[in-house]
Image (spheres, coloured by chain):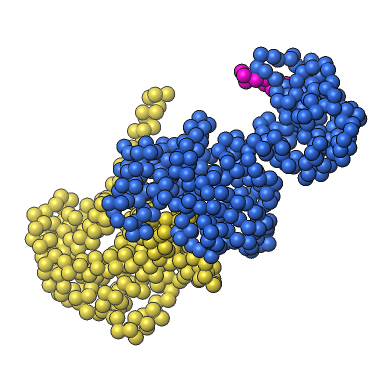
Amino acid sequence: MANVTLRSVRKTYPGGFEAIKGVDVDVGDGQFCVLVGPSGCGKSTLLRMVAGLETVTGGEIDIGGRVVNGIEPADRDIAMVFQNYALYPHMSVYNNMAYGLRNRGMAEAEIKTRVEEAARVLELSAMLERKPRQLSGGQRQRVAMGRAIVRQPKVFLFDEPLSNLDAKLRIAMRVEIRKLQRRLNTTSIYVTHDQLEAMTLADILVVMNGGQVEQVGNPLEIYEKPATTFVASFIGAPPMNLMSTRPEEIRSQLAGSNAADAGIVGIRPEDFVITDETPAGGVALPLTVEAIERVGAETFVYGSREQEDQRVAATPGELPPGEVIVRIPGTQAPAIGARIRVAAVRAKLHLFSGDGRKRIET
Amino acid sequence: MVEEEGFRRYIAHIILWIGIAIVAFPVYLAFVASTQDNAVIANGQMSLLPGGHFFKTYYQTIFVGTSGSTREPVGHMMLNSLVMALLIAVGKIAISIISAYAIVYFRFPFRMSIFWLIFITLMLPVEVRIYPTYKIVADLHMLDSYAGLSLPLIASATATLLFRQFFMTVPDELLEASRIDGAGPFRFFWDTLLPLSRTNMAALFVILFILGWNQYLWPLLITTRDDMQTIQIGIRKMITTTDALTEWPIVMATAVLAMLPPVVVVVAMQKLFVRGLVETEK
C-alpha cells in the first residue's frame, strides 16, 4: 500500500540525450496508472527509473513516503513484470516464483504457502514443476505475474506485459490483470503503447510524448477533453479528424465566441452524422467516399474533402491531409465514389490553438 | 530418376566407407601390432589379424612399462596426463568464465583495454613465449610438478571470448529481474549465469580436455623426473632406444591407451557438447 509520486523527474543519458524532460505524476494508493505513448516517448525509461534499473538525473521518486532515488531495486519494495517475462529458463515455475523470496531469507514453509496461493489464483497449480520453455506464451505471462504477486510488494510495475501475446489472449489477460489488481488493491504502474489497453485499464492515464507528459487524468476525461492535438489523435481509434480552420468553408461555420483563436478543429469519427442539414455553430463537410470498411456493428467511411487541406501539426496516427474518417452504424454503407455530406454539432467540436499545443474551451 | 537417386547414394556411401577406412586403418594396425609378439613385428612378418598377446602386452604396458627406455608403468603416465588435462580444462573454464563475467557485466576503468589485452594474448600461444614462461615456472620452483604442467596453460583468451559472446546473448532483463529479486552479483552468477552456461561449459570441456591431453612440447620441457612423465612424452621415449630393440607391441598398446580417454570424454559428453555448439534457445 503506497503512493508513488514523481517530482520533476529527469533523465539525461551520458551522450546528452534527454529522455525524460521533467515529469510530475502522482499515483494514489491502490490506483492503476497507465503510461501510454508512441515508441521512444520515454515511458519505459520512466518505469525503469521507478524500478531503480535506471539512474535518476534530476528530481525525486517517492514510493510510500520514502525518496528512493539512490536505493537498490531489491530494496524499493516493488515487483516488475517484463515484456519478455524474463523468467529464469533453468528453474521450474515454482522456483521462479520462490527465488526472490528465498533471497530475502523467508522460511521455506511460508514461501510454499505464498507460491501455492499465487499458483491457485493464476491457475498454474498443475504446472509448478515445469520449466518455462514447456509453457505457452500466456502461461509464461502468468508465471511472470505470479513472481510479482508472491512478493506482496507496495507497487507493481508492468512493462508492456501483453505485447508478446496474440490478440485474443491479450484481451483475456488484460481483464485478468485488472481483476487481480482490484482484488490485491496494489498500486500499479503499467506501460503500454496500445491506447485501447490504456483506456480500459487505467484509473489514471498519463499520455507521454517526447519525454514529456502531454496530459494526465481519468481516461474518459482525456478522451472527451484532449489537451493537445497529440492526445486527440493518439487516444481513440480510428483517430480524431483534425483540420485546419483556415479554409473558408470551415471558418465561416465557426463564427462567434472565441472560436476565432482556434487554428485547428478536431472531430471524432463517431461524432459525424450523414445529413443535409447544417447544425448551428457546428461543422458540415461535403465528402467524396474513397473507401469503406464494414466491420459488422459499425462502418467506417474514408472520405476526401473537396478542398485540399494544409497539413496540420504532425502527430502519430494522424490522417493524411484532406482525408476524413466517419463512423456510422453497421447497417448503413454509402457507395464508393458517392458524394455525401456529414455534419457535427457544436458541442462535439474540439478546438485547438494553431500549433496544437493548447485546447480552447468555448 | 529414382534409379539415379539410388545410384548416387551408392557412390556416396562408397566414398564415405573409403574415408572411414583411411582414417581407421592406422588405428586398427596399431591395435593389431599391440597384440603380436615383438619378434614377429621385428621380422617384418606381422599379420593383419590380431595375435594372441593381448592380455600379456596390456598388463605389461599398464603396470610395468618398457624394460629399458621409460622405466615407468604407462598406467602412471596416464594418471599424470589425466591430472594435467583435467587441471587445464577445469582451470581454463573457471578462469575464463569469471573474467568474461567481469568484462560483460561490470563497468570499471579500462574495461575495454583489458578486454583487448586478453584478446591480444590469442596471438601469443605457449610456443611463442616458451622461454619466458619456462623461466617463470623455474623461478617459482614448479618444474616437475602438476602446477607447473598446468598453470601456464590455463589462461585462455579463446574461452574468455566464447563466454563473453554467450553472456552477451543472455537477455538484460534476466539480470534486471535478478536485481529486483534481491540477487547480488555473486548470486546472479551462481544461480542464473552458471546453470545457463552448462552446455557451453561442456562443449569447452571436451575441447580443452583433448587439448590438455595432447600437450607435448610443454611437458617435454618442464618434466625431467620419470614419475612426472605424461603419456605423450612416454610414447616418444619408448620409440628411441639406443642399444635395444624397440618394444613395438608396448609402444602400440600405449598409443591405443593414449587414444582412449579423449574418446571416452567425447562419447560421454556428446549430447551436451552438440547442444552447446548449436543451441540457440536461452
Q: Is residue A77 visible?
A: yes
A296 lies left or right of A93: right
Q: Residue A51, how many percent across, how many down?
A: 52, 55
Frontmost residue, B63 versus B70: B63
The magenta region covers A289-300
A117 relative to A281, above or below: below
Q: Residue B220, how many percent across, how many down?
A: 29, 74
Q: Is residue A87 magenta?
A: no
Q: Chain A: what color?
A: blue
Frontmost residue, A163 versus B203: A163
Q: Quadrant of residue A309?
A: top right
Q: Is residue B164 visible?
A: no
Q: Residue B259, how many percent across, how many down?
A: 24, 58
Quarter of the rendering occupied by the C terminus of chain A: top right
A187 lies left or right of A338: left
A325 lies left or right of B229: right
B101 relative to A145, above or below: below
Q: Residue A314, how many percent across, how many down?
A: 77, 41
Q: How many marks?
A: 0
Q: Which residue is drawn at the image coordinates 51% and 46% (left, top)? A: A30
Q: Which residue is drawn at the image coordinates 36% and 54% (left, top)? A: A101
Frontmost residue, A317 versus B93: A317
Q: Quadrant of residue A55?
A: bottom right
Q: Which residue is drawn at the image coordinates 42% and 76% (left, top)? A: B129
Frontmost residue, A85 versus A219: A219
A146 relative to B147, above or below: above
A73 relative to B70, above or below: above
Q: Is residue A295 magenta?
A: yes
Q: Chain B: what color?
A: yellow
Q: Which residue is drawn at the image coordinates 35% and 39% (left, top)? A: A120
Main secondary structure found in the magenta portion: strand
A55 lies left or right of B89: right
